[in-house]
Image: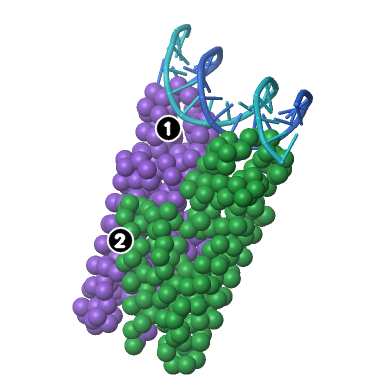
Chain colours: A purple, B green, C blue, D cyan
Amino acid sequence: MSTRDQLIASTQDLLWERGYVGTSPKAIQQRAGAGQGSMYHHFTGKADLALAAIRQNADDLRASAEAAFAQGTTAVERVSAYLLRERDVLRGCPVGRLALDPEIVTNPELRAPLEETFDWLRGRLAEVLAEGAANGELPSDLDPAATATTLVAVLQGGYVLARSSGTVEPFDQAIRGALALLGRR
Amino acid sequence: MSTRDQLIASTQDLLWERGYVGTSPKAIQQRAGAGQGSMYHHFTGKADLALAAIRQNADDLRASAEAAFAQGTTAVERVSAYLLRERDVLRGCPVGRLALDPEIVTNPELRAPLEETFDWLRGRLAEVLAEGAANGELPSDLDPAATATTLVAVLQGGYVLARSSGTVEPFDQAIRGALALLGRR
DNA sequence: GTCTATAGAACGATAGAC
DNA sequence: GTCTATCGTTCTATAGAC
């Protein structure tokens, strides 16, 4: 792994843990085992490096979501596979976490990957739900787009509640409640 | 309003906007129109002042939620009143926002108000849902506690999606989707 | 491409006058 | 109770040797 890649990987971790405001170039360099010179050689500054790391976090999320959707055959199975997939709940979401960061949302370049990721995720989930509504697995009057957004929100909000309580319990309960609402006949 | 109260009010605003990590004593003092001496006279430091501000934010949230629950007579009306109440969506939730902050979740004293607030909110919402399930307004097999947690998560996640996209739309859609799931017969 | 040295500002806090 | 002065550290970035 090149020094450049090490720097990106360290920044991914730190952004996930501490957000943009809470992540310093010095901390990035130390975790990457690189000096200041390396960082400012490969990137113009903190924002530039953060952008690369955010894009990588977004790509990773997309890949693991796609993998979950591939599990199961029925629409409900595929949605459940995504919602119930293994997660480090108390660590939260590497992408959603950044949406609360003031420096991210006010910078169009840094915010763009967030918007794209959630647009894609909501769309992908809506497709699966629409499939289920079409083949009778789910009610035909179900609004796929709105329901997809609700489910993504449950995940993101589940992280917030779990971190607030210090335990995974609210996250699991939120998912369980959502699946129950979706599944009842 | 005393200088002490001004300091707390400024900190409430700044914590909401920028989180704990992103809020500096200097910024608090400037917004409050007070000097360093005042702040360190009334509070032992940043964490002490933040605790007072977080508690106040939590109390405010609780009061406005209680007000929303008082609107409407049926259970569904009361839940809807809470979910649809006017909000500055792109500003996010003053309490939930802090759950993503590393310095908050690792400090038991600072995290406690978050946990208490969401425990209370989930419980309060569960009561209303249980009422609806008991009187036939909602399905009798509805799990009030899990559903309540799901609804609170939808709100918190809705803020995340709205801030990611820069518009209120995903928030509204998430709420709409949740109410549709809850309301269908 | 990586290192060390250094810059100027902001960080959180303390001291002491009034 | 509030002010200004100051402390030692960290922040983000630049300079220049190797």
- Label 2 CA crowd tier, 10 Å (few <14, some 14–19, many 20+): few
Say which mark, if any, is on residue A21.
none
Q: Position of residue B177 (x, y in %)?
A: 33, 72
Q: Tell which subunit mark 1 falls on.
A: A
Q: Where is residue B152 in the image (x, y as percent from the top left)?
A: 47, 69
Q: From the viewer's side, name the closer residue of A184 and B111.
A: B111
Q: Which amino acid does label 1 sit on?
A: Lys
- Outermost residue toward the bottom in this view: B135
Where the C terminus of chain B falls, by quadrant?
A: bottom left
Judge depth for marks 1 and 2 and give the one in front: 2
User: Quick check: B31 above or below A3?
Assistant: below
Secondary structure, mark 1, is helix
Q: Which residue is drawn at 58% across and 65% down?
A: B117
User: Quick check: A53 above or below B55?
Assistant: above
Q: What residue type is labelled 2?
A: Glu
Q: Mark 1 points at which residue?
A: A46
Secondary structure, mark 2, is helix
Q: Where is residue C11 in the image (x, y as percent from the top left)?
A: 58, 34
Q: Residue at x 53, y 63 (%)?
A: B61
Say which mark, if any, is on residue B169.
2
**Labels 1 and 2 share a subunit:** no
Distance of mark 1 from mark 2, alpha carbons? 31 Å
Q: Is residue A51 visible?
A: yes
